């Protein structure tokens, strides 16, 4: 029996679509039934008979921070894909991040050990990997995490989550960790995920930056996860990055794929400084979540790059070119819109 958390999110939904094509028994948890409809939308990308494959999943209402609800789903489970996580860079939500990402992961690890799970796959993030003082040196899985650095609250929570998984490995749980970059995939167009990038560009994004960000196709993430879980590889982490692109290149390539006007103006450091301060005041007066923080403004100007050679060599894996990914996701966006 395979257990998937976060099945109603981008990675989880695409993962389930792949797993239902196998003979494995599959169990997935959800918190709100509304998101289950989006899972069916994703399944529609893969299958004509959506119901046949969707009904292969044994759905249970549960929450990673609610241990009693989790205990009900663990009997017979042999393999766990822990995908569920809270993604936000708003410092005011750090307590939520700590509870869902760190405590939730600890709960999953503890129950996996208690119920004799054979293998555990954790979806982390490149945010949980350290940074080099020299930005020209690509970051690898061995790059040192500096707790004293100016880390975002999201990065801190994912690093703490990884520590729980590593702790599990010391207690006998075989595990693998994947550290994806920005994951591009179809089906989830609202919220803080990558789907919102396509919406913003489609609506007419005015500015770009010269900063470098890293991207990966959701199909590649899912493929790597499944291959690692079927292999004898254990107690290792892997960076999942297809390409390191400037924000300008990504924005203009996506605009072309969506057949809309590309951003024409570069956002200077001064302009971004004004923008994140204005967003702080917007939150102060309205109580709404932050859309741009000081650290996210900093990140879209940085020149950080990541090295994907470890996973390529380990699995002889080839990543999908970003142009191909963007073309496919843009096509789905236009269809869904």
Image (cartoon, grey):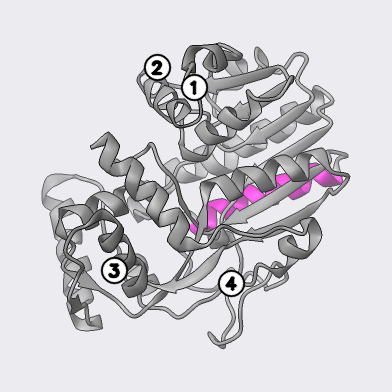
- Labels 1 and 2 touching (C-beta < 8 A): yes
Q: CA distance from mark 3 to mark 2?
A: 36 Å
- Labels 4 and 2 touching (C-beta < 8 A): no
Q: What type of secondary structure mainly makes up the magenta span?
A: helix
User: Mark 1 or mark 3: which is in front?
Assistant: 3
Q: Is residue 321 above or below residue 137?
A: above
Label whose residue precedes the other's in the sequence (4 or 1)? 1
Label whose residue precedes the other's in the sequence (4 or 2)? 2
Could you tell me which residue is drawn at 43 percent across and 26 percent down?
44
Q: CA distance from mark 4 to mark 1?
A: 32 Å
Task: Tell me if mark 3 has few (under 14), some (14-19) or many (20+) residues whose alpha carbon lies within 10 angstroms of its own.
Answer: some
Answer yes or no: is residue 209 visible. Answer: yes
Label whose residue precedes the other's in the sequence (1 or 3)? 1
> Magenta stretch containing residue 169, yes or no?
yes
Per the image, the residue denoted by label 2 is: 33
Could you tell me which residue is drawn at 46 percent across and 35 percent down?
9
Per the image, the residue denoted by label 1 is: 30
Nearest the viewer among 263 and 105 is: 263
Mark 2 residue element? helix
In the rendered image, which quarter is residue 33 located in? top left
- Labels 1 and 3 touching (C-beta < 8 A): no
Residue 219 x %, y %: 56, 45
Q: Which residues are magenta?
A: 155-170
Residue 273 x %, y %: 22, 75
User: Mark 4 or mark 3: which is in front?
Assistant: 3
Q: CA distance from mark 4 to mark 3?
A: 22 Å
User: Which of the numbered marks, if any, corresponds to residue 306?
Assistant: 4
Q: CA distance from mark 1 to mark 2?
A: 7 Å
Q: Is residue 322 left or right of residue 69?
A: left
């Amino acid at each position: 029996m395979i257990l998937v958390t976060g099945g109603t999110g981008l990675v989880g939904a695409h993962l389930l679509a792949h797993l239902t094509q196998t003979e494995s028994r599959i169990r997935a948890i959800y918190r709100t039934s509304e998101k289950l409809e989006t899972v069916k939308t994703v399944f529609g990308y893969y299958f004509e008979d959506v119901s046949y494959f969707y009904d292969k999943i044994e759905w249970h209402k549960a929450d990673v921070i609610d241990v009693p609800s989790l205990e009900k789903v663990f009997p017979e489970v042999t393999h766990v894909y822990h995908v569920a996580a809270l993604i936000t860079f708003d410092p005011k939500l750090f307590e939520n991040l700590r509870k869902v990402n760190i405590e939730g992961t600890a709960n999953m690890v503890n129950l996996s050990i208690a119920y004799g799970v054979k293998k555990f796959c954790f979806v982390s993030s490149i945010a949980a990997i350290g940074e080099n003082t020299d930005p020209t040196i690509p970051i690898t899985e061995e790059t040192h995490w500096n707790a004293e650095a100016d880390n975002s609250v999201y990065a801190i929570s994912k690093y703490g989550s990884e520590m729980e998984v590593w702790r599990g490995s010391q207690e006998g749980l075989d595990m693998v960790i994947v550290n994806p970059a920005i994951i591009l995939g179809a089906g989830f167009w609202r919220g803080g995920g990558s789907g919102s990038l396509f919406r913003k560009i489609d609506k007419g994004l005015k500015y770009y930056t010269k900063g470098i960000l890293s991207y990966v196709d959701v199909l590649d993430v899912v493929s790597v996860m499944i291959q690692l879980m079927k292999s004898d590889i254990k107690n290792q982490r892997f960076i999942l990055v297809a390409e390191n692109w400037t924000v300008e290149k990504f924005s203009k390539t996506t605009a072309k794929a969506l057949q809309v006007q590309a951003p024409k103006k570069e956002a200077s450091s001064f302009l971004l400084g004004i923008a994140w301060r204005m967003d702080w005041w917007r939150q102060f007066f309205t109580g709404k979540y932050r859309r741009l923080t000081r650290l996210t403004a900093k990140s879209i100007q940085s020149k950080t790059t990541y090295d994907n050679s470890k996973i390529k060599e380990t699995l002889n894996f080839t990543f999908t070119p970003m142009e191909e990914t963007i073309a496919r996701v843009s096509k789905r966006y236009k269809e869904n819109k």
